[in-house]
Amino acid sequence: MTIGTYILVSLIKIVIVMFVLLTGVAYTTLAERKVIAHIQNRWGPSRVGPFGIWQPLADGLKFIFKEDITPPFVYKPIYLLAPVLSLTMALTAIAVVPIGPWVSIGSIRTPLQIADVNIGLLIILGLGSIAVYGVALAGWSSNSKYSMLGSLRATAQMVSYEIALGLSLVGVLIYAGSFSLRDIVNAQSGTFLGFIPKWNIFTGQFIAFFIYIMAAYAETNRIPFDLPEAETELVAGYHTEYSSMKFAMFFMAEYANMFTVACLASVLFLGGWLGPVFGAPILQAVLPVFWFVVKVLAFIFIYIWVRGTLPRFRYDQLMAFGWKFLLPLAIANILVTALVVALK
Amino acid sequence: MHLVLFFIFGAVCVGAAINLLVQKHPINSALSLIVVMGSLALLYLLLGAEFVAAIQVIVYAGAVMVLFVFVIMLLNAGEEEVLPHTSRVAVTLGVPGLIVGFAIGVWVISRYAGLDRISIGGPQVLNGTEAFGNPRSVAQLLFRDFLLPFEVTSILILIAILGAVVLARREE
């Protein structure tokens, strides 16, 4: 493949993935409101279009037309930088996620992934650790006590849970022997007894999976770990002083992070695009992507389900849970996995 | 291509480092330091050390600098005060002196160490030997060749953590 075709193919992939991701982000907000409404015996948004399906568009338009207020007491350069930083890091992470196997279209052969890098997992973790600045700087530069408290909580929480999150993935890395997300998926192919897939969740990384989910909920500041924006105590936490599109950028970053977490969970523990593939050639090409999307959407649904079910933790409970329960459990998981692999 | 990228990121790195010194506000300095760390990671990447680059971002730009920013946020440190008595000699001679010193340094290095023989960036640095920045070679170094120093360092850091906890703990 020449460099020209390579760039063209990459650009096409980027445009498609961004379009799908942003649409997914928009419709997750609707899905969240609908599902929570049904959990609470309400109807949810139902006025804009049939079943309220144009609600995200209406919300987007509303955000654009809202007055963009910059309070006079903020530290302006960083106040403007923070939402951009958050959203950029959240949207960049999707670039290394493998959506499907290699495909051939005519003479062009390309992976269904924007960038197939051999340190894909570390890139996502690195982007996650940079994304902390978006939240921390937003709260500090707003120069308001609610923002400050929210961002202090958020920073401490994200730094603490990043450790448990990173350690929970080590078991998977030991199995796959690679940081490349594509290799990790390929290492999970095959079945036990002909019908149980050899996904990491079935091959002994069950505990790691739950550590990952809990740490990821804390990383994305979602219920039951949504203390940084606890609206009953902190108005809106770190983005209290933001309005219009600048608030929308934080909002989009949160939902884009949910997608990254869901993609990573299905790649690392549920075998990514692996699943039963059958039928006509066109069906065989589409089915892997279909399985991947199904797994990701299932995760998004669990996110919403948890939000509709659980109350918020207290802050000391949150810290104790992260440091005294998740972290030792993750380390024990690494030890056991390493022993099993070494003795095999 | 490697050379062009090397000079771009090298310039970003030096520019951010100078900005770090010039800025009056601590948070701006901390952010400049993050940019320095990030461009250093990109320089590692150009050398073919992708694992080291990723760890540089996660550990330094991510974890260490978050603590810096955290402390600045908690102390709410304001702008640095300009010292009333700045030395006139330093002001007039400072910039020319720095340039002359830098030029002498470059001349000495190129005269005796041979700057023309140093190839910058790209896989040609490896000289056909095995890559040195991938996870496997880093692990070989840490857990086989330098196992004892590595473990001793970790115990040292553990002692430092315990010391910090003891010092920070309030007396009952």
Image (cartoon, rainbow, N blue to C red):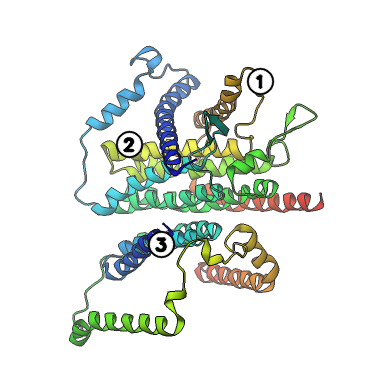
Q: Residue at x 56, y 31 (%)?
A: A103
Separation (CA) of disc 3 from disc 1: 49 Å
Q: Residues within 10 Å of mark 1 (few under 14, many from 20)?
A: few
Decide: is A315 above or below A12.
Answer: below
Q: Can residue A316 be seen in the rendering of this structure?
A: no
Give, as a three-letter code, the residue at label 1: Phe
Question: Does residue A263 appear to the left or right of A37 in the view shown?
Answer: right
Q: Earlier in the sequence, mark 2 or mark 1?
A: 2
Decide: is A325 above or below A109.
Answer: below
Q: Mark 3 or 2, which is nearer the eye?
A: 3
Depth order, front residue of A212/B34: B34
Which residue lies under the disc numbered 3?
B3
Q: Which mark is residue A68?
A: none
Which residue lies under the disc numbered 2?
A248
Q: Chain of mark 3?
A: B
Q: Are marks 2 and 1 in contact (CB under 8 Å)?
A: no
Q: Residues within 10 Å of mark 3 (few under 14, many from 20)?
A: few
Q: Secondary structure at mark 2?
A: helix
Which residue lies under the disc numbered 1?
A278
Separation (CA) of disc 2 from disc 1: 42 Å
Q: Are marks 3 and 1 on the same chain?
A: no
Q: Are marks 3 and 2 in contact (CB under 8 Å)?
A: no
Q: Mark 2 or 1, which is nearer the eye?
A: 1
Q: Chain of mark 1?
A: A
Q: How far across and down, in percent of the image, does residue B73 sit?
A: 36, 59
Q: Can residue B125 be seen in the rendering of this structure?
A: yes
Q: Secondary structure at mark 3?
A: helix
Q: How far across and down, in percent of the image, does residue A129 sit?
A: 47, 52
Depth order, front residue of A332/A252: A252
